[in-house]
Image (cartoon, rainbow, N blue to C red):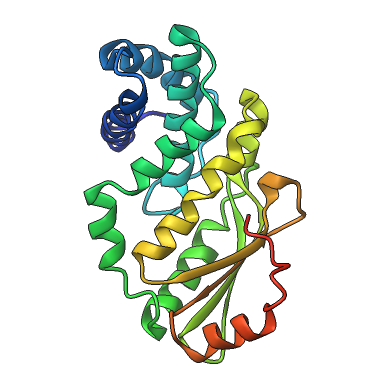
Amino acid sequence: MRIGIIDRVIFSVLTSTCVRELQEEHPEWKEKHIRKTANKRFVKMMRDTPDIGSYSQNHLKICLVGGAVWFSIYEAVEELYGKMPTELYGRMCNAAMSMPLMKRKYARTPFFTAKYQDNYIKKAEKSGRIKSEYNWSMVVEKCETPDALKVRFTQCGLCALAKRTGHKDILTAMCLTDYTVADQMGAVLHRDKTLASGDPVCEYLYTRPGSDPEKRWQQEHQDGSFLKK
């Protein structure tokens, strides 16, 4: 994959936020050293990954590039300071998705509107035309009202990248950031299957807090057996 200006901006912004989070626990870790080492690994990782279209062609490309940044930081820390605990890695990823820039972006997302959901379906169909193991295969299903939306993935580009780079063990920690994003959009995410954890699909159900679909979901899962993945 060719590295462009947007990719480098994503690397720079994410790295700064991620390292600040790591330094909360390890102030002795040097951002300059981590950034330099991670950049080399990021460049190689990107160049070794087949292209999955431009950002305008594929709305999920940012997920693949962001994942490559996170994996690169993880590798850089391991090279410089030793293996990073998965719990700390998860906090790092979540910090990146919680930065003010992301909060503003997702807070403005009109997720529970018919117009937004129709556009989301079109984006999913458009990105799905690009055939690559590093792309996502997804189906978006509208519900009886815009107060809920179902999304199903049968292929995940990050799973392919994690498998190739040997990072399947930390992938599920990254997946948990989806709950942070949902919360920032004003949604409740219900998910008990992920490709990263070995399930055949990732199944998402988003509901609006306090809506009839959310109330029904709560009534149907009172036994507490639903697994949050």
172 sits to left or right of 14: right
Residue 186 picture location, percent across and down? 36, 71
Tell me where residue 96 sits by quadrant: top left
Residue at the location (37% across, 18% down)?
39
* Residue 134 in the image: above or below residue 19: below
Residue at the location (65% across, 27% down)?
164
Q: Which one is in front, 169 or 158?
A: 169
Q: Which one is in front, 37 or 191?
A: 191
Residue 26 picture location, percent across and down? 35, 19
* Residue 90 in the image: above or below residue 195: above
Residue 184 picture location, percent across and down? 34, 62
Residue at the location (50% across, 28% down)?
71
52 sits to left or right of 131: left
Residue at the location (66% across, 33% down)?
168
* Residue 101 in the image: above or below residue 121: above
Regarding residue 41, the answer to whether it shows in the image is: yes
Q: Which one is in front, 87 or 207?
A: 87
Q: Which one is in front, 212 or 164?
A: 212
Q: How many numbered discs, if any?
A: 0
* Residue 190 in the image: above or below residue 9: below
Residue 68 picture location, percent across and down? 47, 31
Regarding residue 134, the answer to whether it shows in the image is: no
Quadrant holding the C terminus: bottom right
